[in-house]
């Protein structure tokens, strides 16, 4: 659990410091790895699939779609604290 907390903290810091699109794409990549890993490891779990696990994966799939959408749209950045401009 500490690793997840650290990952969320690093992500939050990066949203403030880096280009948000890169952070969103990184989050999307992590979601893909987690989703693929869940289904790849199903053969070694008992039960292979359960309602709670599938519900969490459905929520993660929605998050993946939102992260991709955010990464593809230009975020708004503040230009010298005065005017809002769209970043390329």
Image (spheres, rainbow, N blue to C red):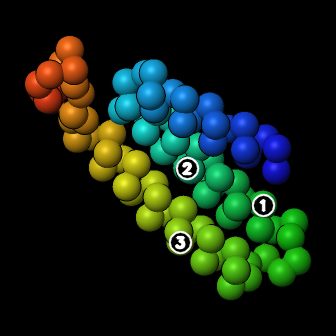
- The residue depicted at 54 percent of the width and 36 percent of the height is 12
Q: CA distance from mark 2 to mark 3?
A: 12 Å
Q: First in sequence: mark 3 or mark 1? A: 1
User: Which quadrant of the figure contains the C terminus?
Assistant: top left
- The residue depicted at 38 percent of the width and 31 percent of the height is 20
The location of residue 72, given as percent across then percent down, is 26, 40
Badge 1 marks a residue whose secondary structure is loop
Residue bearing mark 3: 58
Residues at marks 1 and 2 touching, judged by CB atoms closer than 8 Å: no
Q: First in sequence: mark 1 or mark 2? A: 2
Q: First in sequence: mark 2 or mark 3? A: 2
Badge 2 marks a residue whose secondary structure is helix
Question: Left or right: 10 with respect to 1?
Answer: left
Residue bearing mark 1: 41
- The residue depicted at 63 percent of the width and 76 percent of the height is 54
Badge 3 marks a residue whose secondary structure is helix
The location of residue 71, given as percent across then percent down, is 33, 39
- The residue depicted at 46 percent of the width and 58 percent of the height is 63
Q: CA distance from mark 1 to mark 2?
A: 14 Å
Residues at marks 2 and 3 touching, judged by CB atoms closer than 8 Å: no
The location of residue 23, given as percent across then percent down, is 46, 33
Residue bearing mark 2: 32
């Amino acid at each position: 659990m500490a690793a997840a907390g650290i990952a969320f903290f690093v992500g939050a810091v990066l949203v403030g410091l880096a280009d948000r699109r890169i952070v969103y794409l990184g989050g999307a990549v992590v979601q893909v790895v987690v989703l693929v890993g869940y289904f790849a490891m199903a053969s070694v779990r008992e039960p292979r699939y359960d309602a709670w696990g599938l519900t969490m994966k459905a929520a993660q799939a929605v998050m993946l779609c939102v992260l991709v959408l955010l990464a593809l749209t230009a975020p708004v950045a503040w230009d010298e604290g005065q005017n809002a401009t769209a970043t390329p």
